[in-house]
Amino acid sequence: MPLLPHFQKWLVENGVPHWAAYVVPALTGIIVALLFLFLMIIVYIYLERRGLGRFQIRPGPNRAGPFGILQAFADFIKVLTKEDITPTNADWPVHFLAPVVAFFSAIMILAVIPIQKNAFITNLNIGILYVSAISSLGAIAIFMAGFGSCNKYSLIAAMRGVAQLISYEVPVLLAIAGVLLISGSLAMGDIVRSQNVPFILLQPMGFLIFFIGVGAELNRSPFDLMEAESEIVTGYHIEYSGMKFALFYLGEYGHMVVASAVMTTLYLSGWKGPFLPEALWFIIKMVMVFLAFLWLRATMPRIRVDQLMSLAWKFLLPLALVNLFATALEVLWQDNIGWEQFPWPFVFLNLGLAAIFILVGSKLLFKTGGGRVEV
Amino acid sequence: MVLKAEPMLISMGPHHPSTHGVFRMRLVLDGEVITDMEPMVGYLHRGIEKLAETRTYTQVIPLTDRLDYLGSMTNNWAYVLAVEKLAGIKVPERAEYLRVIMGELMRISSHLMAVGFLGNELGCTFTPLLYMFREREKIMDLFEMVCGQRLTYNYMRIGGLSHDIPEEFLPAVKKFVAEMPHYIDEYEQLLSENEILLARTKGVGILPQELAISSSVTGPVLRASGVKWDLRKADPYSIYERFEFDIPTGTVSDVYDRYLVRITEMRQSVRILEQAIKQLPPGEARTKVPLLLRPPVGEAYAHIEAPKGELGFYLVSDGSIAPYRCRIRAPSFTNITALRDMLIGWKIADAVVIFGSIDIVLGEVDR
Amino acid sequence: MKFEHYGRGMAKGMALTFKHLLRHPITTQYPEQKLNVSRRFRGYELVWYEDKCTGCATCAKSCPQGNIEIVTVQEGDRYKVLKFEVDTGRCMACGLCVEACPYQALYMGRGYERARYRRREVVLTKEDLKPSPERQPSGYANPEVEEQLPEQTLLVYRK
């Protein structure tokens, strides 16, 4: 039985009035979830800075605290004590609220993520639909930030950002739909429970589409056009300094924590694992997903905005549709066999189909657009 | 209600992380497509040509260090060649060979910077840059051993070099030259076949051959447009006829070709270095020249193949201890004149990449 | 543009970065470990030996910027140097003054940590320029000093 209702029942049995027995477990759950989020953000920031340094044959920050653990705190203090500048002609409410929206859209998804067998804040029966709806709020935050600062570079970045985020939602949702066909339920706890074989093996092409799509949603290299430092000088957060910038930064890493949590739930069989406690398996898998993103960031250059759009619409979308179709056919077929008992033939079948479709697709579909435009 | 669309004017201004110095470009944009461009230079003007008129011939050499500050040895060399031509001074053999060794090491270092920063502008977060800086550190250590400084060397003098090399120099250079091809292979493994890099740089920023010749573009940009013109073979100065090396050219004059030309030039420089080290004769490093040199009245122009292009010095002397006029033909300044035609029709992201592939240094442009 | 080699180029790049992940970093942790500078290092200071100096001011004449200020007074048949000041804030460490001195009284220094809080502290007077344990002469243009200095740490020899 989930932990928080347990706590509520215990409180009522000990004579606490009903309204308090409702509010106190909720607050405890929220505080624990926020602490988990902040702890994971700090771990991610540390891994990113030291990891990028080691990829580049340098140590990374190692002065603040032993092995540089307190670097995030040092940055936080620096950012808190900076002056908060708002441009004169900027639209003040929009400029003020943009970082708030960016950070909170990351926090709200935490409510449905299963860290242990029965540990969520709520077990929504529309779990994954809620997640994808809230993650679209990130696009609004970026547009508010770019439009609200009175700056041409921010405007260009905001336009690029909205285009990128909207166009990558579609293949991501279709990849999720493939997972839902197999698991049969929208609730996140049920998705994890139905993974005897992790879905990364059953849906390799779906995983690849989800990985690339989520990388584009999170502004990670090679898709970090919105904050391309070499072209438009950090894009939508040019005019932000002080705590607002810190909120954007936290929001970006918060989205990353939440996205890697969602990816382990959907594809890497969440908290399941042999010897260690389940929460530890969850965290290990999240960190492995993050390390994959970090490795990509250290190596790849950035793609251009028209190439980004044609990648989403002309390559990932047809592949996602084909994936959905193939999964649907297999689900219909398995009604005769019994999914629980023989999933392995489907693993090899799906791996083979994925290889064929990706090769064929990159040969035929993938003509990235944009050459020189006649002016 | 009538919808109105206007072109947007953006100033990729003096403060920008990707213009190589304080360079200002005014772009007229239509969405993301560039329709017009105007370069504005002069933010780093220090009056070097005017300062040279009040300094003796030896005192101008530290000034020339600061022109293309990433290629100081070749700047010194060009100036000293001009003075030697003016005054009719002959340089000993050992000094010529050592000058070639320094010049080719400088060329490798400058191309490493150019390719590294091209990777940075493409968006790889500093990774190729830091790998290339490792080799550049080794070159800077070698230069520090010889002349005492890492960036502005002041090593060449009229009539030779300022001092002879110490005895630890040659073993270190031999070790460097033996390992360098392996490192260039590493850079090619990281960058040359990367699909994203190919998508960003192939076919982008084409400079047609006739336009390159008519705009007097020189250096790797000209060679990538298919013209086989290198001053070391076309008008050999110093002792370059004694070495064998090839001149790489490109076919489609896009950004990818310029990148490949620079990498291949690094390999050819390593080849020249191997030959020069083997043939190094003993001797002295400098002919005796009076402290205050008074060349005869006249004028001279000397040009060399600097890493960025053709660097030329035009000196007019009136018999006194200081030059009457010193005019510097800087390669980066002439290469910028071709920038507008390369940029129109491409997007903002390409503007930075194309600009980085021309590889200018603002010290030369503004002097 | 087509997707040229089906991702093989990207995979090679990622293999290279992974190989570099397993290597030891080549950075020197600065204040704790310092590398030896070259024996001919041109640091941002000068070292002056008063007993060898005759006040001829050849060094002041050869400086491209005029950083050296010398005031002498005639004493018998020699010059006595009253004031010898070097403005190291404007100095570009070109070494022309050291090469020009005919009596080898002037040497370049080996220090590079010369940041000060006040501009007047950067101007070195007659007393500051004398050699001391913190201010050692470098071997630039002076081979006899060069032989006694420690060898430079080179990155080519580090693995």
Image (cartoon, rainbow, N blue to C red):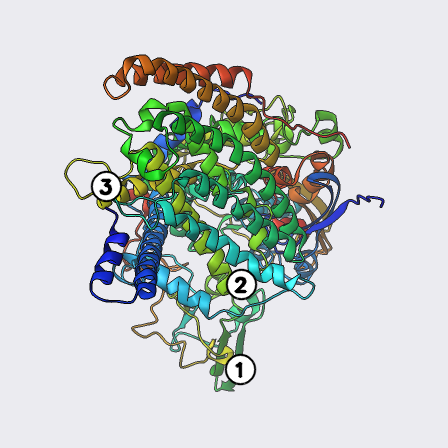
Q: Find residue A332 and name its label.
A: none
Q: State which mark lies toward you, 3 or 2.
A: 3
Q: What is the three-letter code of the residue carrying label 2? A: Ser
Q: State which mark lies toward you, 3 or 1.
A: 3
Q: Nearer the viewer, residue B24 or B332?
A: B24
Q: Which residue is mark 2?
A: A241
Q: Chain of mark 3?
A: A
Q: Secondary structure at mark 1?
A: strand
Q: Residues within 10 Å of mark 1 (few under 14, many from 20)?
A: few
Q: Find residue A281 and name its label.
A: 3
Q: Chain of mark 2?
A: A
Q: Residues within 10 Å of mark 3 (few under 14, many from 20)?
A: many
Evaluate whether residue B260 shows in this view.
no
Residue A260, horizontal then vertical, whole percent: 37, 41
Q: Which residue is mark 1?
A: C71
Q: Chain of mark 1?
A: C
Q: Secondary structure at mark 3?
A: helix
Q: Residues within 10 Å of mark 2 (few under 14, many from 20)?
A: some
Q: What is the three-letter code of the residue carrying label 3? A: Trp
Q: Are marks 2 and 1 on the same chain?
A: no
Residue C155, horizontal then vertical, whole percent: 33, 46
Q: What is the three-letter code of the residue carrying label 1? A: Val
